[in-house]
Image (cartoon, grey):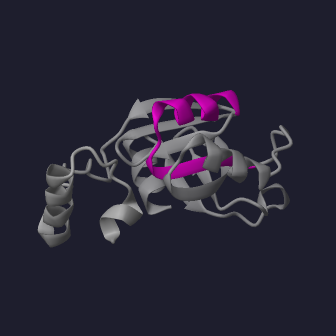
Amino acid sequence: MEALSEALSEVGLTLHPRSRGARREAADAVVRSPAGDECAVVVKQMSLANVDALQRLLLGTSPSGDEAEPVLVVVADRIPQPSRAWLGEHDVSWLDLRGHLRLVAQGFFVDADVTPQRERPTRSSALAGRVGLEVAARLLTEPGVPPGVRAIAS
């Protein structure tokens, strides 16, 4: 919720805790514009928003298409391009913590780059450390043997 609040504030919107109004009972929070427009949201967090995980998530929610229903917003560390396209096709809003916000709802349309809240991972050496050296030695000493996890582990 904090990450979404920060991203929304960058585009001039605010996020407020859930209202107790009848139409917003299922909402986690309400997005407000400076003009007073409001949009109830349900926020779901995940690390990697791949299409399979998103399909399972959408099965667990029941959007009716009714304006009174809260808008689903997926907040994830990473949302790859195929997942972004899938979310758009299914009218789901999202925040990629690497720096992009998309909110589409009645009276709202935001598709903007925002300050990244998660650093892009730096490359690490896959063969670093003692185990990595053992794996590298195995691959070099037996180049004709296909490297399987169990074979290398033994």
The answer to whether any part of residue 124 appears in the image is: no
Q: Which residue lies at the image location 16% right of the left edge and 56% below the top edge?
A: 136
Q: What residue is shown at x 47% (from left), y 42% (from top)?
A: 79
Relative to residue 40, is residue 121 drawn left or right? Answer: left
Quadrant position of residue 20: bottom right
Assign the C terminus to one quadrant of the image: bottom left
User: Quick check: can you spot residue 71?
Assistant: yes
Q: Locate residue 149 relative to residue 138 in the image: left or right.
A: right
Q: Is residue 83 above or below residue 136?
A: above
Residue 121 x/y as whole percent = 25, 51
Residue 33, given in percent of the width and then of the height, sits at: 55, 41
Pick the residue in front: 46 or 6: 46
The magenta-colored residue range is: 70-90
Q: Residue at x 35, y 39 (%)?
A: 114
Magenta-span inclusion, residue 86: yes
Side of 52 where 66 appears, left or right? right
Report if residue 135 lies within the magenta region. Answer: no
Q: How many marks?
A: 0
Position in image of residue 102 (x %, y %):
52, 35
Query: With 141 as the anchor, is 98 left or right in this view?
Result: right
Seen from the viewer's position, the closer of residues 140 and 7 is 140
Q: Nearer the viewer, residue 14 or 45?
A: 45
* Residue situated in front as seen by the camera: 11 or 63: 63
Q: Position of residue 80 (x, y in %)?
A: 46, 37
